[in-house]
Image: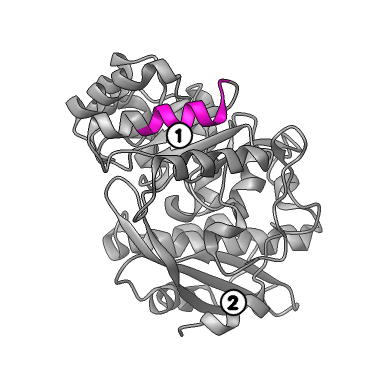
Amino acid sequence: MKITGVDTVVYEWNRKKAISNGLHTYSKVRLGVVTITTDEGISGIGYGAGGAGIDWSKLVPYFANQLIGENPLCNEKIWYKMWIPKTVGRRGATTRAISAIDVALWDLKAKVANMPLYKLLGGAKKRIPVYIAGGYYEKDKTLADLGEEMRSYVKMGSKAVKMKVGAMSITEDAKRVEVVRKAVGDDVKVMLDANCAYTVHEAIQFIKRVEEYNPYWFEEPVQPDDYDGFRRIGQATFVPVATGENEMTRFGFRDLILQGELPILNADAFEVGGITEWMKIAALAQAHNRAMAPHGAQTIHLALQCAVKNSLILEYYPTRFYEIGDLFSHTLELNDDGTASPPEVPGHGFYPNLEVLNKYRIN
């Protein structure tokens, strides 16, 4: 089997209302799709989006030219053929492009094996607890609106929710946490995500202020390279510190684990170098008794979380987050116990719904 083509398509649309976290505002949604084809008619699908100001559709072909003629089942060989730090950089947009290609290779590999991806990778579990991510800042959004949003996630069957903090004063955000806790009750897990908005002393002040509301974790309180800051915050509170969505490759997570006070790792397969690298990070985390709770879309992470034993919980963005309808062939539905199960089909099971997406194609 040989790779005969690597194609990229990017879709983008405006949000009806911009959403913000502790540092950033998002007025658009962007989805990049990589399709790898072979001489045997089997193809694999990967996802990514680059980032603001990055022409993702031109970045992937830089690597694509190196893949033609390679056996797509040899993902380890291909990964090292692409990842050459002297040439492409150790982090950033190029590693995201490698990630998308690698995800497509694993989807293809699972299809060749005629197995669901989660089983091919290990099949440790058939279901994983879910938390619904939301609680963004929005124009004219009131405390009552925030509470009702979180209640709606619980009504969907979720046993855990996540909200944003860090864009308002410590007093104002503490009030928002109080509102959410009262809205969902004591039995629902509430995660707090600062998206790197705080300094170390601000993060400690804030988390001590809201400890009474029993947060399940405190995510990305400081900048991603502030390993010492994570350690100091972790030592100051009983609330677990989670981070890693902006970390890349197993080398970055090696340093993060060794230097930070971090029981929960948010490794994102779309950022770290794809599934090949994510599985190595998961093994490294397991060796250090760390839990995996990946950041980002559930399309791939549902399979990955069910593949490994040290998975904790899955981040889930409901259809309404994307605003234009079902983007994928499989719509994730929650089980009665607030968990989710991966599709029992060959591959990862989440494929682009072209009827919805085609009108938003930008390349």
| Residue 184 shown in magenta | yes
- Residue 22 vs residue 356: left or right? left
Instruction: Please name the predominant secondary structure of the magenta segment in the image.
Output: helix
Give, as a three-letter code, the residue at label 2: Leu
Q: Secondary structure at mark 1?
A: strand
Quadrant containing the N terminus is: bottom right
Q: Nearer the viewer, residue 15 or 120?
A: 15
Query: Which range of residues does the magenta coloring cover?
Result: 176-186
Q: Is residue 291 visible?
A: no
Residue at 51% in and 54% down: 274
- Mark 2 or mark 1: which is in front? 2
* Residue 204 image-quadrant placement: top left
Compared with 148, 103 (above or below) is below
Q: Position of residue 273 (x, y in %)?
A: 45, 54
Compared with 211, 74 (above or below) is below
Residue at 25% in and 40% down: 168
Q: Position of residue 304 (x, y in %)?
A: 62, 44
Residue at 32% in and 54% down: 91
Q: Nearer the viewer, residue 84 or 96?
A: 96
- Residue 275 vs residue 164: left or right? right
Residue beneath disc 2: 357
Compared with 105, 303 (above or below) is above
* Residue 92 image-quadrant placement: bottom left
Compared with 92, 142 (above or below) is above
Q: Are marks 2 and 1 in contact (CB under 8 Å)?
A: no
Q: Secondary structure at mark 2?
A: helix
- Residue 145 vs residue 114: left or right? left
Residue 176 is labelled as none
Q: Nearer the viewer, residue 184 or 125?
A: 184
Distance from Cα at disc 2 to Cα at disc 1: 32 Å
Residue beneath disc 1: 265
